[in-house]
Amino acid sequence: MSVPRRSPEGRPERPNDHVLTSIEICAGAGGQAIGLHQAGFKHLALVEIDPYAVKTLRENIKSLDEWSWEREYCDVLSGDVNDFRPLPNADGSQADLQKSVNFFGRPLLKKELDLLAGGVPCPPFSHAGKQLGKDDERDLFPRMLELVDELHPRAVMIENVRGIKDAKFEEYRRYIEARLQGGRAQRPETGVEEVFDGLGYEVCEWDVLEASDFGVPQLRPRAVLVAIRKDVLGDLKFVWPTATQAPKSVFVALKESMEDRYKPYISAGGEIAELAKDRLAEWKRLASLAADARKDGGVAPTLVGGSKKHGGADLGPSRAKAAWKNLGVSGMGVANGYEEGERKESQGRDLFGSDGPMLTVEQAAIIQGFPDNWKFTGGKTAQYRQVGNAFPPPVAQAVGKAIADVLYAARVRDARAEGERRDALPGQGASAVADSLDDRQRAGV
């Protein structure tokens, strides 16, 4: 169900039983949320600590028609995920989820959520960072496991940088898997090996996906863990996503937007028009040459979002800047849009520099696979960091679709089993079977 039906009052009607619900932590500016939404999931909560990213999520949900379901039922929560409380506490204190009561008619229950997802912070495992792993205070895998235990969702999806798959983190990965599905592993806090009972999940896959295999014009490998609750998976098989299309080049991805950026200057006539024509032609020459000649098909290097501790936005370290230069793009900063560039008189740097044009935030978003209508809030640097730190939506969509296939198949299987049970108990009466099914649904099983 992509857009809810409307009631006479203009509010979305309550969805039917086939809606797949999700909660996402560390949601950022919405890259993963968009992909999961496109895969058919409806978000009950998006939790994010960065205020600019929170505003981005809220503004897009407020303005985009395709997000009308979330306008009614999704809480966009600003704050530390360690303080997030999705369920009511034992003392009766209220849960953080308020809008979902409109969906369920009551607070969310344990085992009721379909998917818990999160792009937990990457610095602990990033090749660009110190790779402290479990010893890094920014490691939020422990909090993710706490939420899995608390919510007991039907499926779990965790995204991180590929560095977590490095050999030095093998023991930590074994611990995460043991916590989810049971097994022997070293407890990170003590280094003592233990046997864990697990939380009732099967880790179906923990592997690396390359964004360029899913239509994203960028080399961006991401490690993704998918675990499905054992009672849900049963005899079903999770199918890991495979490449959906050939890599899209930067030339193809940015051609239209580059033409649009130079168009006002070409239309102005005179010397500036000739300069604009020359610079646009040179960008097209270099970008198309890379698309034809390079083994990677002329895709972009990995965008780097950076952090608040390090100056303004740029397109990464020296190696990345050299790769951008071969694509006809200057990696020394991020360009202002047309109006801002005119006001600040920065177009000499932004569009007409000797190393080629700098990317705008909007063009960086294209490189990440964001939809054209998804807008970012904050200043230019804040916007670029939201884009650069995102999980590309097309990759999230592919993983989400694979998870959704299992969850829908499980519903069909369980409904068939319920029908067979009904047929086997004619003396019980249809109402007794229906009552039994209602009881189990209320329990979230």
Image: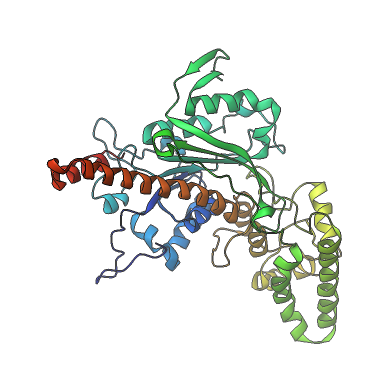
Q: For the point 35% across and 54% down, which residue is it? A: 18
Q: Nearer the viewer, residue 65 or 359?
A: 65
Instruction: Estimate the x, y position of residue 87 in percent, counting from the top left.
Output: 32, 38
Kindly identify the residue that appears in the image at 69 percent across and 36 percent down: 129
Front residue of 284 and 212? 212
Image quadrant holding the C terminus, namely top left
Residue at horizontal 43%, vertical 62%?
Answer: 67
Residue 134 horizontal/vertical position (percent): 59, 26
Q: Is residue 259 above or below residue 430?
A: below
Up the image or down, 203 lies above or below 365; here it is above
Q: What is the x, y in percent for residue 375?
A: 54, 63
* Colouring chosen for the image of the structure: rainbow
Q: Is residue 70 left or right of residue 426?
A: right
Total residue callouts: 0
Can residue 437 be seen in the rendering of this structure? no
Q: Quadrant of residue 14?
A: bottom left
Where residue 75 sits in the image (x, y, percent)? Answer: 38, 51
